[in-house]
Image (tube, grey):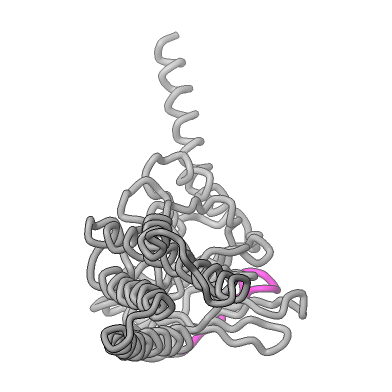
Amino acid sequence: MWITFFLVTIFCFSMSQAVADYCENVLQECLKRPTAWTRCYEDKIMTCKPRGRFMAGIRQLKVDSLQEVDVSPTHEHRVHIPSSALQRSRGNVPEVEVLVVASVINSSHFKLSPRSKGRQIQFHRREGTVFRGSVLSVKAGTLSVNNLQQPIKLIFRHDKEVENGTCVFWAESAMGNGTGYWSTEGCETSNTGNEFICSCNHLSFFAVLVNPQLSVSKSHSETLSYITYIGSALSVVFTFISLIIYICLHRRRPEKTTNLHMQLTGAMLCLHLSFLLSCFSAWLLNEDSPVCLVLGLILHWSLLATFSWTALEGFHLYLLLSRVFNITFRKYLLKLSLVGWDAG
């Protein structure tokens, strides 16, 4: 009896292992792991067994590494891999043939991690809707392939369903809990009208994001940043010159109006300076550093003070017109200063 039970157990275990070795079951087996399932998938999809000649969403090819190859796991997805990428994927192995596997995975299995604090990661990170919920996985050979001179082309057919899209790949987070983010690093996007063509310099999990939250290209983003910095720097210079002029006028002929102009100009100078310093500190330091927090508070206070002094300028102009230039309030400038600077 015990021998029969032991044989049945071994048979069931071997059958479960055989079922798990099929390519169609690799994804479900890897998703059961608590750590990053993508690494498990990349390893097992290269050693799995096809259940039949045709597998839905999975395409395996044994190709010559000296020639380029096209792989189509579905009629909507196609991958073009140059020979240089195939040769690098096999390393120093003498065999010329290389196994290439392209598969389509549902995007719901990819869990987004919280936003990272690194500036470089935030710049390349994209958030949006994965087009048709399809992620294209491409794996070749036994070695990782990246920094290619000849890019790999991934074609996503859209038939004019959407006009704009951004090619991204899945980057795992450093937390090691299976989460990650969509990144554009190393990928470029082109649209032929019916297809999105992604040119990437590595192999990974790829997708197309539609309606991305940040659609400005890197060159345009840098240009806009430089324009902002130059404009703020010029504002600092001319605001400082204006402040000097008002101080000289106030010394020659003290007037309440000139004093108000000085206060407003001083608030604007603090606003532009704190904005520039905040931008440079965010670029050089971590965004959660105490310096950035202090500069952020100063920037907020300067903005409120500028608004307050602008409103007080309007109030003073109203009094000048209504009282016909006869303002005789007691400690008038002191009261305005308390309101203007304390309101900030």
- Name the one closer to the observer, 327 or 93: 327
- Name the one closer to the observer, 47 or 35: 35
Q: Is residue 218 left or right of residue 320?
A: left
Q: Residue at (40%, 75%) from the top-left corner?
A: 256
Seen from this angle, which residue lies furthest top? 1
Q: Is residue 62 above or below residue 232?
A: above
Q: State yes or no: residue 322 in magenta.
A: no
In the rendered image, the quadrant that contains the N terminus is top left
Q: State yes or no: residue 69 in magenta.
A: yes
Q: Is residue 279 left or right of residue 223?
A: left
Percent x, y for residue 98?
Answer: 40, 75
Q: Is residue 312 above or below residue 246?
A: above
- Name the one closer to the observer, 239 or 336: 336
User: Residue 67 appears in which quarter of the rendering?
Assistant: bottom left
Percent x, y for residue 105?
Answer: 58, 58
Percent x, y for residue 311?
Answer: 53, 67
Q: Is residue 334 above or below residue 40?
A: below
Q: Residue at (66%, 69%) from the top-left corner?
A: 74
The span picked out in magenta is 68-77
Q: Residue at (41%, 59%) from the top-left corner?
A: 330
Let me know if residue 90 appears in the view.
Answer: no
User: Residue 314 appears in which quarter of the rendering?
Assistant: bottom right
Q: Residue at (54%, 81%) from the top-left corner?
A: 198
SS majority, magenta: strand
Let me know if residue 327 appears in the view.
Answer: yes
In the rendered image, the quadrant that contains the C terminus is bottom left
Percent x, y for residue 132?
Answer: 68, 64
Figure label count: 0
